[in-house]
Image (cartoon, helix red, strand yellow):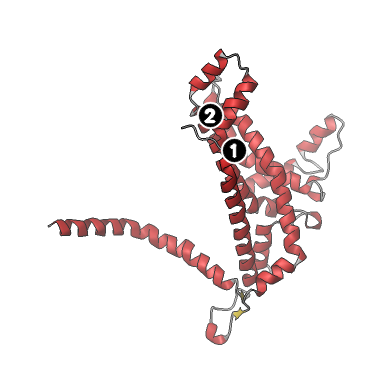
Amino acid sequence: MQSERNRKKWLTIILFLLPSTIGLLVFSVIPIVYSLVISFTDWNGLNPWNLAAGTPDFIGFGNFKSILEGEEFWRVLKNTMYYIVLYIPLILIASVLAAVLLNNTYKAIGLYRVIFFIPVLTSWVAAALIWKWLLSDEYGPINAILSFVGIDGPAWLQDRIWAMPGIVFASIWKDMGFFALIILGGLQAINPTYYEAAHMDGANFWSRFIRITLPLLSPMLFFVLIMCVINSFQLFPQVMIMTQDAGPYGSTQVMVERIYKFAFKYYKMGYASSFSWILFVIIFVFTAVQMKLQKKWVHYDS
């Protein structure tokens, strides 16, 4: 009787898990393995998978060697790192400031929080088109505002120096609400007795922020940092829409943009798959380093 009940219990568990397991296999595990196999081949992605006919051609690590020895890979990696260096400090500062502002009890604070979150709900197509208009050197409002204070604004997306900062501004506007919401949750979880004790000791606002708020927010900041780094390496829609040809002189060419074009424009599916796996290794290494370093600056309120 007991064994019959156990059999029915396990059968129920398996039936509930089966749909998600099939979805995971079909849409994640099999494509990942398939991509790894393709990365060792020279395949245009158009011919059917027919080993008997000799296509695709197995070339071992040929694609990986060609990518790492080429100048293009190092150029797009440099552009991606340039984006990361600009984007991450600015998005962290902007998100913390927004969270601090939204952590007060203003009148209609709920409305302000919704307004900050609206860009997150906006599709990247719409957001990129809005920012393409804002940064236009002919009729863009940003250059018009700069001209009022005597500054001659650059041709943002047509200038090899300013094209990437323009994309960074758009990314910050789009992402700030999401990260501010995470940090806001951390602010509201801080025990108020810490601030009361600090206030009784005469600590001012800045001192409380540096010595109490930031250390107790470090787990949320660490999570935001991890997400920002991963998102930065996967930079794609804003580049494709705001600078269709990857900016002047390829100044906004980044890794995912290259993978997309190699796969679906140049029909070099094997080469694009190898590029994808190199990108995976880079993200894995960066994440592992951050996980290792977190012990030195992340504090958990026990």
- The residue carrying mark 1 is 297
Q: Is the residue marked by circle 2 packed among few (<14), some (14-19), or many (20+) residues within 10 Å? A: many
**Residue 282 numbered tag:** none
Residue at x 30%, y 59% (from the top left corner): 14
Residue 169 pos. (x, y %):
70, 41
How far is the residue under mark 2 from the one under mark 1?
A: 18 Å
What amino acid is found at the position of numbered circle 2 in the picture? Answer: Leu
**For the point 79% across and 41% down, which residue is it?**
139
Residue 267 shows in the view: no
What label sits on residue 187 in the rendered view?
2
**As shown in the figure, which amino acid type bears the numbered disc 1?**
Trp
2 or 1: tag closer to the N-terminus: 2
Q: Is residue 269 above or below residue 150?
A: below
The quadrant in which residue 141 appears is top right
Provide residue 265's location: percent of width, then percent of height: 67, 67
Q: Secondary structure at mark 2?
A: helix
